[in-house]
Image (tube, rainbow, N blue to C red):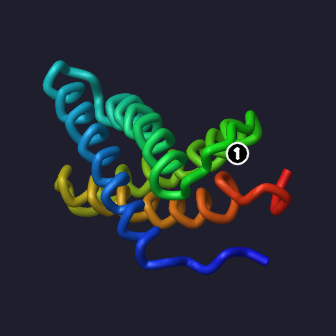
Amino acid sequence: MAEKIRLRECLKFLVGGGSAVIVDYVAYRLLLHFGVSVSPAKGVSYVAGAAVGFVINKLWTFESKRFSPFEIVRYAALYAVSALANAGVNKLVLLLFGHQLFAFLCATGTSTAMNFLGQKYFVFVKKGEAE
């Protein structure tokens, strides 16, 4: 049976995720500043944030001390799906409202929820629960 969601875990995820979002946003803005178009800039910045998020969430949020190559595969699969959702929401909100920050926040909120649930119940599961 899956573990319950704990408030402490959610707060850790938000702090760790906040670090990843800062990396994502700074990279996004820098790439836009240097002339990279919106979708490629968002894709690259999202991957940078995802890498930071993996380390923080594995070691701190979900306290997954053991190493399993399956974690990397599951994490990559989760982030591939949530990256598509992130980019799609970003583009849709930009088309509808034309505001980059609002689009970024909507995209980030969508992928944050997907990533928390996916990491908790799919990526960093306790030994014996998945694999």
Picture layout, residue 116 above or below residue 123: below
The residue that appears at 41% across and 57% down in the rendered structure is 89
User: Would you call the spot at circle 1 few (<14 residues within 10 Å), some (14-19), or many (20 or more)?
Assistant: some
User: In the figure, residue 39 lies in which quadrant?
Assistant: top left
Question: On screen, 24 above or below 100?
Answer: above
The residue depicted at 40 percent of the width and 37 percent of the height is 52
* Image location of residue 63, percent across then percent down: 55, 54
Q: Which residue is mark 1?
A: 74
Query: In the picture, which quadrant includes the N terminus?
Result: bottom right
- Taking the image as shown, residue 15 lies to the left or right of residue 66, namely left
Left or right of 129: which side holds 47? left
Q: Is residue 100 left or right of residue 81?
A: left
- Give how far across and how far down residue 55 sits, in percent: 48, 39
Vertical side of 29 occupied by 110: above or below = below
**Label 1 sits on what residue type?**
Arg
Q: Residue at x 56, y 45 (%)?
A: 79
Along the viewing direction, whichever of 86 and 65 lies nearer the viewer = 65
Q: Quadrant of residue 49?
A: top left
The structure residue drawn at horizontal position 54% and vertical position 57%, both measured from the top left corner, is 62
**Residue sitting farthest toward the front:** 65
Task: Give the quarter of the image for residue 24.
Answer: top left
Local secondary structure at mark 1: helix
Between 107 and 49, which is closer to the camera in this rendering? 49
